[in-house]
Amino acid sequence: MIKTPAVQKGMTLVVAILLISFVTIVVAGITFFIVEIFRRSDAQATDLQCIYLAQAGIQNAIYQYRFRDLTGTGYFNFGQTSVDAGRFFVVGGNPADMVMVNSAGAHFRAPDNKNLEGITMQSASSTPVTIDRMIVSWSGPSLKLTRIRIGNSNVWNNNQGLSSPANCNINPNVTLSNAVTNLTYLRWNAAALGMSWVKIEFVMTDGSTKVVQVYPYSASTSSFRFTVKATGKTTGSPIYRTIEADYNASTNNISRYNEISAQITP
């Protein structure tokens, strides 16, 4: 069959349309592929920047604490710090994270050996934190806790005493700043020298808690430490990374360091 010029033109038009459609699809696919590569590459770069910023926040907090600790009581500041116009980190932590307890001088006072003394407390941040309850536990003699004295005040009394674990509602609540506060003594109803250990769980007004072994003292396990958290972010991106670290002020080193999913906000 001989094709007429009209048929040949029609076929040429169909082929041209198919070619144009094919080229359009290929170009669109390649464009999408390239855009996706750039998008992922940009997200990866932002993600990497965020982890570096979070690390910078941790190091900055520890530097602030150590710098101030050279001439007095160390502390660091909560909040946002801009690295440049588009990048920043936010440092924070809950109240229990900030509680530092120094029990290097912990001892039972002679001659009756009822009082555990020589313990101090403070906040590691410039933001004060408040103790609502103290749960005191011990191993050894079957004694009862009768009093807790902080600073110049008896903040808990019970003449009958409580067995371990003694859940003590602190009244009035005790607020810790970066200045040293004396945990003047814990008192039992009889000599307590036979105790293997004494631990305190601090319950803060926000419900956060921290457990500290105050006796016997060990620099490697001392809770004269704080936990700091820092989130790194870049402006205009939903991506963030958060790191938390424990700093032991007794040994001047970071004892724990890991990434968490929570975002610290100003």
Image (cartoon, helix red, strand yellow):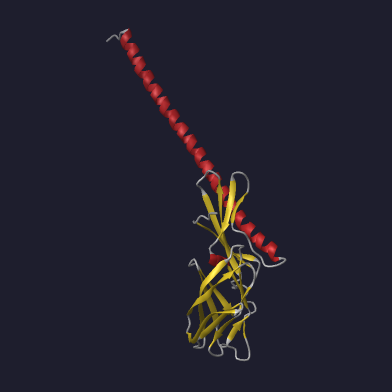
Q: Residue at x 42, y 26 (%)?
A: 24
- Residue 156 horizontal/vertical position (percent): 52, 80
- Residue 159 horizontal/vertical position (percent): 50, 87
Q: Which of the image's four quarters has the C terminus?
A: bottom right
- Residue 243 horizontal/vertical position (percent): 55, 57
Q: Residue at x 44, y 30 (%)?
A: 28
Q: Is residue 18 above or below residue 109?
A: above
Q: Residue at x 52, y 38 (%)?
A: 38
Dividing the picture into quadrants, the one containing residue 16 is top left
Q: Report whether 35 appears left or right of 100.
A: left
Q: Is residue 200 above or below residue 189?
A: above
Residue furthest left in the image: 1
For the image, the number of numbered tags is 0
Dividing the picture into quadrants, the one containing residue 103 is bottom right
Front-most of residues 261 and 28: 261
Residue furthest right in the image: 71
